[in-house]
Image (cartoon, rainbow, N blue to C red):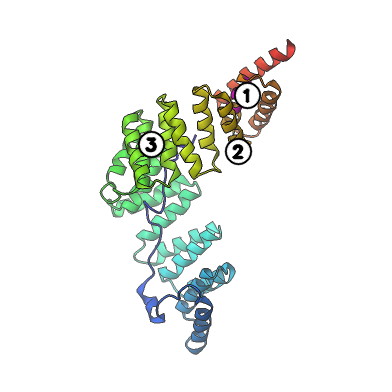
Amino acid sequence: MNNNNIIGNGSVPQEFPHGHRLERFGDKPKKGDHKRAVDAYSEAGKMLNSNDWEIHHCLGECYLASQRSEQAMQESSKAVELTNDKIAHIALAKLAISDNKIDQAIQAYKHIIQYCGDNVEAVIQLGFVYLQQNDISRAFQAFGTVLAQSPGNVEAIFPMAYIIQNHQEYDVALSKYKGTTQALSESWQLWNNIGMCFCGKHKFVAAITCLKRAHYLNPMAWQPIYNLGRVLLMTGQSASAAIHLCAAIAATSQNSIPYLLLGLALKKLNDIQGAEQALFKAHSLTPREPIVLINYAIVLQIQNKAVRVAEIISDLNDICTTMNVELQIIQAAQRISRKINQIVNI
């Protein structure tokens, strides 16, 4: 299961400030003024020079604010054809990401890196794009490039530590996170990740302390409260785990994993019907998740619901033919199948 380590905008800023050159057009249009701004910029383009990249850039910004993404992309594309200024290429990259045009975003950031002098932020953003695409090696290389030039760059240290943590090198990750604690002392994502590093090292008291701090810093975030429930379940505190997992579900009702762990906690508390309800919900949200299926089958088996168990195991067996499934799950499914067959034969 995912460790739910978090990188978010609150810990590593992913926004670039606009440059001062746009100030000659005045302040950005307020909400509701975008149509008039488009007319003004269009008229300025006719009066001044239609090849002025800043006019096309600002038109793109106005179209984007008006939720006219196609026109925004057209104007932003015109802007980058006329200049190597990173402001225009950053705007195009962000717009491409919002439209899920990842290759175009990558090319925009690469252009900044190649042609603009101050490109550290572009390298960081490119690293985030690779990370979001699960291209871990290129992401690691991008963040490493930044740290080679600027070893104390927190915006690169944090995602680097995240990657290292996901490779279960918890001591190395903790040493990286330590370098960000002064700058990010109020970051719930930082304390969430540190907590899960301690969890990976089986230092559960430290993990709980850090996760409680993360939850205190952002009570609305579901990840710290979910991870608290997970650690409490691992340490045998099933009742407390169930309470925290219910809180996580309230914050992210369409995520199946909190329902799965709630089902396991309730099973340990001998609330089998409650466990079945939680696992039913988890199954409805992710009907092809093997770990949900096997735990749902186990709870149903406890209640002697053989027909439904057979259906679940059949679904799981079908999934095993199309994707890699953990050996432990496959073996558990085989044991359940043998028991079901014994019941049928009797």
**The magenta stretch spans which residues?**
295-301
How crowded is the residue under tag 2: few (<14 C-alpha within 10 Å), some, or many (20+)?
A: some
Instruction: For marks 2 and 3, give the CA distance.
Output: 24 Å
Q: Residue furthest right?
A: 345
For mark 3, what is the residue?
196
Q: Nearer the N terminus, badge 3 or badge 1?
A: 3
Residue 38 is situated, as x and y percent measured from the top left of the image, at 52, 79
Question: Toward which corner of the image does residue 122 lie, by quadrant?
Answer: bottom left
Three-letter code, disc 1 = Leu
Q: Nearer the N terminus, badge 1 or badge 2?
A: 2
For mark 1, what is the residue?
300
Circle 1 sits in a helix, a strand or a loop, which is it?
A: helix
Q: Does the magenta stretch include residue 300?
A: yes
Circle 2 sits in a helix, a strand or a loop, which is it?
A: loop
Q: From the viewer's perspective, is the residue at label 1 or at label 2 nearer? A: 1
Residue 41 is situated, as x and y percent measured from the top left of the image, at 49, 82
Tag shown at residue 286: 2
Q: Does the magenta stretch include residue 37?
A: no
Three-letter code, disc 2 = Thr
Instruction: For marks 3 and 1, give the CA distance.
Output: 31 Å
